[in-house]
Image (spheres, rainbow, N blue to C red):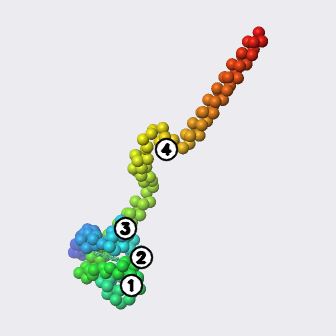
Amino acid sequence: MKTVKYLLLATSFITTVSTINAAEGPEIFKTNCTTCHTVGKGKLVGPDLKNVDQRHDEKWLNKWIRSSQTMVKNKDPKAVELFNNNNQIPMPDFAQLKEKDIKALLNYIKTESASLTEVAKTPNPAPSVKTIEEPEKKGNDPFISFFRDNPVSIFFFCFVLLLLGVVVVLVKALTSLTRVSYKRE
Ligand code: HEC
């Protein structure tokens, strides 16, 4: 019975710790990183951190976040390349972050990246784009703008004109024919 109690205590302890960690990830990111980084919203001072866990392994990221400049000075090839590709702007050290903080942080970046790729996969954001474009497309002249918006209708318009012409010619031919037949009588 006692062991069950201990087990229960241990699991509840572990779950609280991990939930705290999960909640801490976004917090740590917001307070320390958002001035220079986004996840999926493009480059700020530093690179977009979307899918950064796929670019480097966890050990490298741990070292980098604690002190990127130490890595640059030690000529870690990836660190030197990053530093040079970003106008040699040094990223500040976050030596105060513990391994579990960085784990929570990386977890947050990972889930955020995953949710972003999911959004990108959902099809068809096109209609909203269309509604934005539509008002400025419309010219002052409704007649011209109608043809600009429906180029196919020009063919239709020409076809109708042609048909009208044919009808006029036919009617003329018919009337002259009937005239001829009147004359005969
Ligand atoms: C003052 C701006 C600044 C802050 C704050 C900052 N960084 Fe950076 N970070 C950079 C720059 C600049 C680079 C590019 C490398 C370089 O120039 O040293 C970079 C690079 C990185 C990289 C490598 C990115 C890649 O594409 O490989 C990671 C990972 C990273 N930062 C994580 C963090 C995390 C996590 C935090 C918050 C704890 C943070 N950074 C806070 C400026 C910053």
Say if 149 sits above or below 79 in the image: above
Residue plotted at (75% across, 12% down): 183
Q: Residues within 10 Å of mark 3 (few under 14, many from 20)?
A: few
Contact, mark 1 vs mark 2 (Cβ under 8 Å): no
**Of helix, strand and loop, which one carries label 4?**
helix
Q: Residues within 10 Å of mark 2 (few under 14, many from 20)?
A: few
**Disc 4 target residue:** 149
Give the CA distance from mark 4 to mark 2.
46 Å
Identify residue type, mark 1.
Answer: Val
State which tag comes first along the sequence, 1 or 2.
2
Q: Residues within 10 Å of mark 1 (few under 14, many from 20)?
A: some
**Disc 3 target residue:** 42
Farthest residue in the bottom direction? 74
State which tag comes first along the sequence, 3 or 2.
3
Identify residue type, mark 2.
Answer: Arg
Relative to 148, 91 lies left or right: left
Residue plotted at (30% across, 72% down): 36
